[in-house]
């Protein structure tokens, strides 16, 4: 059983203050959220007889997605219901403007600061169980070989019959008792993952630290990753791939992009593999190579860290609007880590851009003009979303840095077992990973990449939110 080091008191309010993150939405935006009504109620198709379920972390209330998945000899039929935030937020009203100021939900260990007021994000807009809710329903046919077939998008109303979590779904799958609505999820998820890898997709399996509240204080640990996390992510990726194709074909929309990895980044990954004695089979893509690495090997951690260089340059691209002199070329529109065209459409309660991309897809599929308010917003969104992503990353890193310094504050001089994720390079110090407690920190000296070694804690400063180690 993993031993976790705990701290009794950690105050994250200072970080929220530094970043300017709060729940002051303004009276007008709050009023709009509290009286939100479905503007498209009379146009919706009724799917309340289909038993949808949600899969989210325990305790989540902002439920963006619900799914019903079936399989037969012709493949899979994915019915994926997404919260219809666009129907509840008045275009260009006070709530819309406030959500554009924020861009995204920001997460802290002691709670989130939602993109939308909780009356909407955890109430009228959330796909809570046993509640009839407006949604945007994606129905996607997937062939037995994993290829995407027919796609339909329309406004509907649904009712979730169960709120599930990742650990529970994984346990149910292992025991052969999955909810009937997702009995086909493991087969679907594994198939789509194989298709993505064959298309050049890359998934980095780096340790995901989390700060968790527990009896008596806070603890650092590795966020549990279950098979259900992987399967469920393929649902979101599938809808995102379909949305990307729809918008690219129409020449209007909002894509998530990542340029092809630079040759130097691939060469650096190959050189690291050679230095660590890890074979990279001829003809294997970087994603396929990384997917075959043993989970517990120290060399895997170093290779995954080095593979971060493949992900440089991610961004957002607004199509068909603004002052662009010509349509972007195909290479500028793809997201290479996904393996093709891609857009965010599955988390509109938590991400601003999803609402607008969804409106484009609905209009294009219905053969209607894209709403003017959507077209006006599109060119402004990439800058907003980049800033929101940066803010979210800052909140996450600052929270973990503070927790590391507090949890380890009285343990300076103690020894820990570490794996070297990245060696020192130029002015950048080496980075190490300690599993217990879950710490990623700098390390003095020149420890060799991909090696296990004992280290000693040399500093833990909560004021500076700094933790450093040195080789023993």
Image (cartoon, grey):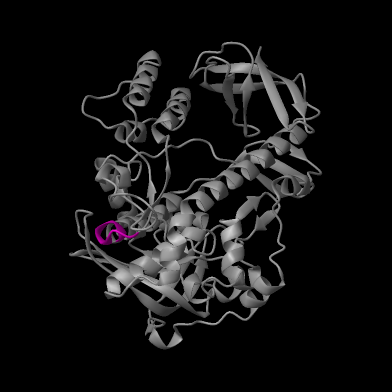
- What secondary structure is the magenta-colored segment mainly? helix
Asked if residue 92 is among those painted magenta in the image, a careful observer would answer no
Q: Which of 69 and 271 is in front in this view?
A: 271
Residue 178 in view (yes/no): no
Q: Which residue corresponds to the image point at 34% horizontal and 75% vertical from the top-left?
A: 154
Q: Give the range drawn in magenta.
A: 247-252
- The answer to whether 373 appears left or right of 92 in the picture is left
**Residue 273 locus on image (x, y percent):** 37, 20
The N terminus sits in image quarter? top right
Q: Is residue 68 above or below residue 280?
A: below
Q: In this view, does 358 lie above or below 404?
A: below
**Residue 389 locus on image (x, y percent):** 54, 47
The C terminus sits in image quarter? top right
Q: Quadrant of residue 221?
A: top right
Asked if residue 248 is among those painted magenta in the image, a careful observer would answer yes
* Residue sticking out furthest to the bottom: 42
Q: In this view, does 369 lie above or below 454?
A: below
């Amino acid at each position: 059983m993993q031993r976790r080091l705990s701290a009794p008191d950690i105050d994250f309010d200072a970080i929220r203050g530094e970043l300017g993150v709060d729940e002051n939405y303004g009276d007008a935006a709050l009023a709009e959220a509290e009286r939100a009504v479905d503007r498209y109620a009379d146009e919706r198709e009724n799917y309340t007889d289909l038993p949808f379920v949600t899969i989210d972390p325990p305790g989540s209330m902002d439920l963006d997605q619900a799914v019903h998945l079936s399989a037969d000899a012709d493949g899979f039929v994915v019915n994926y219901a997404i919260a219809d935030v666009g129907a509840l937020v008045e275009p260009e009203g006070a709530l819309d403007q406030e959500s554009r100021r924020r861009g995204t939900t920001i997460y802290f260990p002691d709670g989130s600061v939602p993109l939308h007021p909780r009356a909407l994000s955890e109430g009228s807009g959330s796909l809570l169980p046993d509640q009839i809710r407006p949604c945007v329903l994606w129905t996607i046919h997937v062939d037995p070989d994993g290829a995407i077939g027919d796609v339909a998008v329309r406004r509907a109303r649904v009712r979730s019959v169960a709120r599930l979590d990742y650990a529970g779904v994984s346990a149910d799958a292992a025991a052969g008792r999955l909810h009937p609505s997702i009995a086909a999820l493991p087969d679907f998820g594994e198939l789509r993952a194989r298709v993505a890898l064959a298309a050049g997709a890359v998934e980095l399996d780096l340790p995901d630290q989390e700060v968790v509240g527990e009896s008596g204080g806070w603890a650092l640990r590795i966020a549990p990753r279950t098979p259900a996390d992987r399967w469920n992510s393929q649902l979101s990726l599938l809808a995102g791939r379909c949305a990307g194709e729809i918008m690219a074909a129409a020449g209007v929309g909002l894509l998530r992009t990542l340029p092809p990895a630079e040759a130097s980044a691939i060469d650096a990954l190959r050189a690291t593999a050679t230095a660590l004695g890890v074979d990279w089979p001829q003809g294997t893509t970087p994603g396929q190579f990384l997917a075959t690495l043993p989970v517990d090997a120290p060399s895997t951690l170093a290779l995954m860290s080095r593979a971060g260089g493949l992900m440089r340059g991610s961004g957002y691209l607004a199509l068909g609007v603004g002052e662009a002199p010509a349509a972007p070329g195909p290479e500028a529109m793809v997201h290479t880590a996904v393996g093709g065209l891609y857009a965010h459409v599955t988390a509109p309660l938590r991400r601003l851009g999803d609402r607008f991309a969804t409106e484009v897809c609905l209009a294009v599929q219905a053969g209607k003009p894209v709403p003017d308010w959507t077209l006006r917003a599109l060119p402004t969104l990439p800058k907003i979303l980049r800033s929101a992503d940066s803010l979210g990353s800052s909140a996450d890193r600052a929270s973990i840095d503070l927790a590391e310094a507090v949890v380890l504050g009285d343990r300076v001089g103690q020894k820990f077992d570490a794996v070297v994720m990245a060696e020192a390079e130029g002015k950048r110090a080496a980075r190490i990973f300690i599993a217990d407690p879950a710490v990623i920190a700098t390390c003095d000296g020149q420890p060799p990449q991909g090696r296990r070694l004992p280290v000693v804690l040399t500093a833990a400063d909560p004021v500076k939110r700094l933790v450093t180690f040195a080789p023993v």
